[in-house]
Amino acid sequence: MSDTTLLETFPNPKPERDYLIEHSFPEFTSVCPKTGQPDFATVIITYVAEETCLELKGLKLYLNAYRNEGVFYEKVTNLILDDLAAACSPRWMRVVTRWGPRGGFSSVITAVTGSAPAGAP
Amino acid sequence: MSDTTLLETFPNPKPERDYLIEHSFPEFTSVCPKTGQPDFATVIITYVAEETCLELKGLKLYLNAYRNEGVFYEKVTNLILDDLAAACSPRWMRVVTRWGPRGGFSSVITAVTGSAPAGAP
Amino acid sequence: MSDTTLLETFPNPKPERDYLIEHSFPEFTSVCPKTGQPDFATVIITYVAEETCLELKGLKLYLNAYRNEGVFYEKVTNLILDDLAAACSPRWMRVVTRWGPRGGFSSVITAVTGSAPAGAP
Amino acid sequence: MSDTTLLETFPNPKPERDYLIEHSFPEFTSVCPKTGQPDFATVIITYVAEETCLELKGLKLYLNAYRNEGVFYEKVTNLILDDLAAACSPRWMRVVTRWGPRGGFSSVITAVTGSAPAGAP
Amino acid sequence: MSDTTLLETFPNPKPERDYLIEHSFPEFTSVCPKTGQPDFATVIITYVAEETCLELKGLKLYLNAYRNEGVFYEKVTNLILDDLAAACSPRWMRVVTRWGPRGGFSSVITAVTGSAPAGAP
Amino acid sequence: MSDTTLLETFPNPKPERDYLIEHSFPEFTSVCPKTGQPDFATVIITYVAEETCLELKGLKLYLNAYRNEGVFYEKVTNLILDDLAAACSPRWMRVVTRWGPRGGFSSVITAVTGSAPAGAP
Amino acid sequence: MSDTTLLETFPNPKPERDYLIEHSFPEFTSVCPKTGQPDFATVIITYVAEETCLELKGLKLYLNAYRNEGVFYEKVTNLILDDLAAACSPRWMRVVTRWGPRGGFSSVITAVTGSAPAGAP
Amino acid sequence: MSDTTLLETFPNPKPERDYLIEHSFPEFTSVCPKTGQPDFATVIITYVAEETCLELKGLKLYLNAYRNEGVFYEKVTNLILDDLAAACSPRWMRVVTRWGPRGGFSSVITAVTGSAPAGAP
Amino acid sequence: MSDTTLLETFPNPKPERDYLIEHSFPEFTSVCPKTGQPDFATVIITYVAEETCLELKGLKLYLNAYRNEGVFYEKVTNLILDDLAAACSPRWMRVVTRWGPRGGFSSVITAVTGSAPAGAP
Amino acid sequence: MSDTTLLETFPNPKPERDYLIEHSFPEFTSVCPKTGQPDFATVIITYVAEETCLELKGLKLYLNAYRNEGVFYEKVTNLILDDLAAACSPRWMRVVTRWGPRGGFSSVITAVTGSAPAGAP
């Protein structure tokens, strides 16, 4: 379902320092596997890079590729985390997805990999 | 009073990871047992799943079943937590209820079960 | 469906002046006639009284009586306006209902009777 | 009930110009004549002065004198307008009272005397 | 491109009164015809019904049908207005589309048909 | 000055769990002992109950009894905490008072008794 | 009291068009003539220039010159309007002063000279 | 200074209707001709097209071309309006520039050409 | 430069408890020693009293005494902390100054003395 | 690329105390090295000074010098931190850059050097 070949990286310009990189993407959309109705989310990716950083153009193509895919909230959040972590091998990474209201519920899924850096907000 | 048979679960798609699931429901209503007047609350459920996750459709039916029940703030918050925890056996779960103003007071009840995951907000 | 016998009035303390009275009620709830699911709205009633004003306690009982009634947005808004206007014969009255999101839509219905007072906001 | 002897005025420094003076007072409190419970409001007074302006110290004493008086929303708003207009004979005056939630309702009463100045907000 | 057969109507419950119906839909998405990149908008539909009202379920299907269509902001706004007006023959209708930032620009398109009702906000 | 006989309690429905109860009351008023001018505050009471919970009706009467009492910010905050803690013997309790601007200053007093529960916000 | 020699102007770059110029200055301070206590205001100047525009550096010096002057709200607002209008002879000018809370009151004074341009906000 | 050759247009898809097009651009920057310091503004362009609409890519290049130009607030606002109006001959056009604080002042310049459409916000 | 004789204290009404007292003062102004231009700040004083508390009237006179003094941000923040701590010998004290924009920068200086109380926000 | 000769310092007025200095600069702009398009950011610099503090005028010149430089988000954030830390040898320093939306992404980069002071927010 997810196309990790779209992801690209570039060398971390400051690998000797643990610093935080955060990209918020308010335009994620996928499809509910049950109802076929579109879902909408803001995806927030935060990480401490090891040797490579995620390039934004590829990250956008990767996220846009879910547009017509049927995925559940919990699964897609973990899938994005696994794919991005596999692509850039970060020291630490967190993916948060904030979903628009469905049936009265607004949902937020938060998944983390690696050990949290000191001072991570 | 509470009907736990309405709750349904599905398998946790990533049981090997501690990740946070949060569902906010701004449309909870019950009835004051003393005055018979309706009460209104936002219910915020946050948890780390073990083997199963809460299905949203059943969760909505469960919460809507309180519509004409007489319950106190403190009791219903703990009851929802106990029922949801019994239904999905989470590693950790928190239920917060934020009640609209009554007699000048705005109330918030927060109940937790299990040990907080590292990095829980 | 609507129970106008619950409404009560009291004499307008300043009938010689056109002045605006506004009551906002964020706790209106009814039931969708199609799906049986509860709907939630803020009801905003604004009027210029003629000889009588609406008493708040009765107004609350009247609005709460819709709690388990099946009504459409458009119909109930006009019905509330008709009932309240019949109860207090205002010089001008407006009823606005702001409904929580359903299927992605947030709706607002605005109905007016009588001629707008100069300077009405 | 209302003590207009507390009000004081000073000469309008620019009587040849129609200009707007607005004083907002978020600390008005009176008592519900029915329940004996305290009510709280923000009072917003806006006017175009003729020959005299309202002095703030006396205005505060006048508004504070309602602290333990039993008054209805609609009556007290018109009473304040009448008293203040009598005290300073403005070309135009508006009194708005915004009341904290009572029984679920938040109310706003708006009373005006005189003809609105061009460009009044 | 636009599929008006998805739209459904129901009889206006109060045709003898000019009243405003507004539906906001924050989950519209289409595709830029030039770049192939997805666009996102909030669509706000406001109208005064003549004999029929727009049914929300069909309206959602109609709007969702643009998901993979290539359309320009200006064109799609007028197209939605024309389609909806054709479907329910309103006395007055306005369609506003608010688009997320693209190349630094946030755009809003507002198209109207019919003569504005008195007191339209 | 403070009338603790107005306070009432009810049995804690879940004494085996440490959970947080919070009541915010934006309508506290007392009198400055120096100037005789009224003071206004929001009082926020947060606690973990032991065997009994505070009943809201009595809590309101207790807080309203300060209406015409002359008290300083620092003293009344500690007094409320002492009275409420004496009435319900909580495992932990915090009282925060947020005062409206006086002479340019906006003040907040925060007093706590008992040991903070794990996860107290 | 007011030092108009500090004001400077520059030629209106587009005198053939009626367009609006607005400068907001949140850092105005003067002294209460009664109590000697400092007062603070935001001053908002809006105008349609005739032949000259107000230069900002001089305008700042002019407004700062009130720092230790004792002036009443109503008087200083009209004085600023008169001084600025005398300095640049605008087709239309409005001065609004928004004062920080004093004795519970927050005040706004609005004075205008000239005839309002079509489309003035 | 301004390079109108960068502007491009496309045919108005609905010339038979007066509808509003608005583009907000929060990333305008130019240089103060006096101090050489950079200035920052949000530019809001609103218009009713005649036969052609402004293409966004060219509009961005046009606005970005001011990056290192020395221009005064009043002049550049009128210049942008003149250039854009010349490029697409709109029935009505308004340009608003909102400038970040300089020397304590936040400024807004609003220039209009053509006759305002009915219902223009 | 700073006049500590203006400060007054009163006995701490609850010295046996560590509780937080916070006073926010949005009307601090001083003068830039370099340019002679006025600076504006909000000063937030938070402390745990030992035997005495700061009296607000004297605190205001003390802060107002900086009105025409030339001081740098960093220096005046530490000076206020030293003066206030000398006046009331608190167990812990923090002074925060939030300065309005100057040359594009908005600055905040935070200085602390004593050991932070458990539960200090 | 970065011109550290523009930076100036002054002696820390209170070197014996660890206190926080924060300067927010919402007007940073540079150029994307790939597309040549301008980027915009708010830069927030927070530090605990050792012997010298950063002078604001030089800091502004330093940040403005990036105006026409092509730099990536991650690199420029670390570069600013390295340059500022080299200039004033702080005990602790953090640089945060918050970038306006590009291709749908809003990015924040956070880099720190030195050991965090107790009580750093």
Image (cartoon, coloured by chain):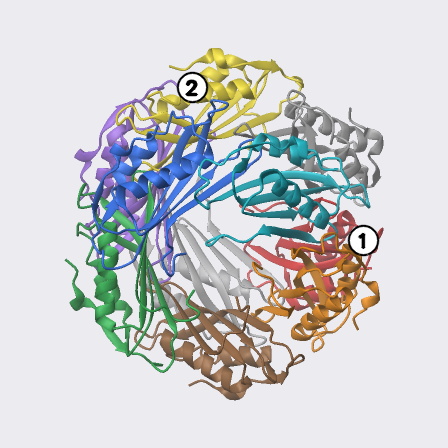
Chain colours: A blue, B cyan, D red, E yellow, F orange, H purple, I brown, J green
Q: Which mark is residue E65?
A: 2
The image quadrant that residue F54 belongs to is bottom right
Helix, strand or loop status at disc 2: loop
Q: Nearer the viewer, mark 1 or mark 2?
A: 2
Q: Chain of mark 1?
A: D
Q: Residue B101 at x, y = what percent?
A: 69, 49
The residue indicated by pointer 1 is D32
Q: Nearer the viewer, residue E62 or A34?
A: A34
Percent of width and height locating residue F72: 68, 75
Outermost residue, top direction?
E5
Residue A117 against residue A26 in the figure, above or below? below
Do circles 1 and 2 both sit on a common chain?
no
Where residue A18 sits, quadrant-wise, is: bottom left
Amino acid at dot 1: Cys
Name the element at disc 1: loop
- Residue E114 visible: no
Looking at the image, which residue is at 53% across and 53% down?
Answer: B116
Left or right, H102 with respect to F106, comes to: left
- Whether residue D79 is visible, yes or no, is yes
Residue at x 53% of width, y 21% of height: E92
Tell me how far mark 1 sits from mark 2, CA to CA: 55 Å
Left or right: H63 as drawn, with respect to H94: left
Residue type at tag 2: Ala
